[in-house]
Amino acid sequence: MRRSAAKIFGILALAFAGAAVPSRLIVSPTPSDGKRIFLRIEPPQEVRVGDYVVFPHRTGRVRGCEDGCLLIKRVVCGPGSLLETRGLDYFCDGRFLGRARRTDSRGRPVEPFSWSGVVPSGKLFVMGSHERSYDSRYFGFVELSRVVARARPLL
């Protein structure tokens, strides 16, 4: 009797894990995050600098996002921090974040986001690790309220 109950419990546990895990995995369509497979963590609750966040975005600059998609980016500057744009270079509290480009990966002109001041409450400045990542350097702040999950890189 105990063996049968243990087998049934084991089968149910495997079935649940098999159904739950794939829905929590996110595969990044581009290498701009430096990682390709992430574990989705919901609800996002506390988001800190260094966290990866998932948010909806619509753009013609990323293949597959013309009608909207989920982007995964790392928070590099958060509310209350000093974000500065100097030419094409970005700094958070004096720490160099990266440089924007004048063209996208297809050679089309792009206008970099410019800001020098404190990051407002409820806003995040996010970046990918790839130098050509489409991120806050181009589309500006991400509203914290639009973040649907945090993501933990797996691979």
Image: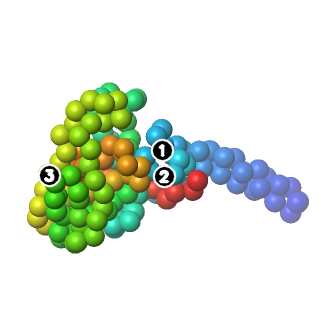
Q: Are marks 2 and 3 in contact (CB under 8 Å)?
A: no
Q: Can residue 137 be seen in this view?
A: yes
Q: Is mark 1 on a helix, strand or loop?
A: helix
- Residue topped by disc 2: 34
Could you classify mark 2 by the number of other residues whose Cα lies within 10 Å: few (under 14), some (14-19), or many (20 or more)? some
- Residue topped by disc 1: 31
Position of 55 relative to 60 (above/below): below
Residue lying at 26% horizontally and 49% vertically, measured from the top left: 100
In front of the other: 56 or 87 = 87
Position of 30 relative to 154 (above/below): above
Reading the chain from its start, which is encountered first: label 1 or label 3?
1
Q: What residue type is labelled 2?
A: Gly
- Residue topped by disc 3: 114
Q: Position of residue 124 (x, y in %)?
A: 25, 58
Which quarter of the picture shows residue 59?
top left
Q: Distance between the residues labelled 1 and 2?
A: 5 Å
Q: Is mark 3 on a helix, strand or loop?
A: loop
Residue lying at 30% horizontally and 47% vertically, measured from the top left: 135
Q: Where is residue 155 in the image (x, y as percent from the top left)?
A: 58, 53
Q: Do the residues labelled 1 and 3 touch (CB within 8 Å)?
A: no
Reading the chain from its start, which is encountered first: label 2 or label 3?
2
In front of the other: 8 or 104 = 104
Q: Position of residue 74 (x, y in %)?
A: 37, 57
